[in-house]
Image (cartoon, rainbow, N blue to C red):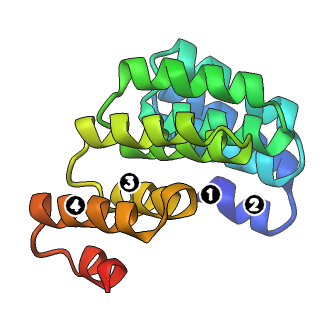
Amino acid sequence: MRAKEKWLAGDVRAARAILQEADVAIPNSEEIWLAAFKLEFENHEPERARMLLTKAIDRGGTERVWMKSAIVERELGNTAEERRLLDEGLKQFPSFFKLWLMLGQLEERLGRMEQAMEAYESGLKHCPNCIPLWLSLANLEEKMNGSSKARAVLTMGRKKNPRNPELWLASV
């Protein structure tokens, strides 16, 4: 919070120093890693942000660190590195649905719809209760194969998540 106060007051250098001290005092804190990343990324220092996340991954970063790393690469337009991070992150954290969503979205951005569908379907095997994955797959099916296929996906989603209003609303 002290680093954030300094940052918001316009003293980025002091915020960096506070976060560096915190990292020395608590060397494996994900919150400190992510705060330092955010400070650098939002101050248009993508290389520093990337370096911090790489260090966090090397220290045993969690799924959030892998996700943020892929986001940095997406923002920088480095799709090969984004894909590598998503693939590696999914090997370690296959039940973290956001990585599956990001992989599917990457494939869609690249116009690789079949691979996007595979990503969403694989994600649903690991995260069958993830509503955003069901909705993304249904939307993709509608684009590729029409509303009847999308309807079938939503029906399957509702069977696995019978009381979810988002799936019912999408079906309507």
- Residue 6 lies, with reference to residue 110, above or below; the image says below
Q: Which mark is residue 157?
A: 4
The amino acid sitting under disc 2 is Lys
Q: Position of residue 103 (x, y in %)?
A: 55, 37
Residue drawn 75% across and 34% down? Answer: 73
Compare marks 4 and 3 and give the one earlier in the sequence: 3
Q: Nearer the viewer, mark 3 or mark 2?
A: 3
Q: Badges 1 and 3: C-beta atoms under 8 Å apart?
A: no
Indicate whether 58 appears above or below 165: above
Tell me how far mark 1 sits from mark 2, CA to CA: 6 Å
Quick check: marks 1 and 2 in contact, CB under 8 Å? Answer: yes
Under circle 2, the secondary element is: helix
Q: Nearer the viewer, residue 152 or 102?
A: 152
Q: According to the image, label 3 marks what residue?
A: 133
Marks 4 and 1: CB-CB under 8 Å?
no
Camera-near label (2 vs 4) is: 4
Name the disc covering residue 6, or none: 2
Mark positioned earlier in the residue sequence (3 or 2): 2
How far, Cα to Cα, is label 3 from label 2?
39 Å
The residue that label 1 is drawn on is 2
Q: Quadrant of the C terminus?
A: bottom left
Q: CA distance from mark 4 to mark 3?
A: 9 Å
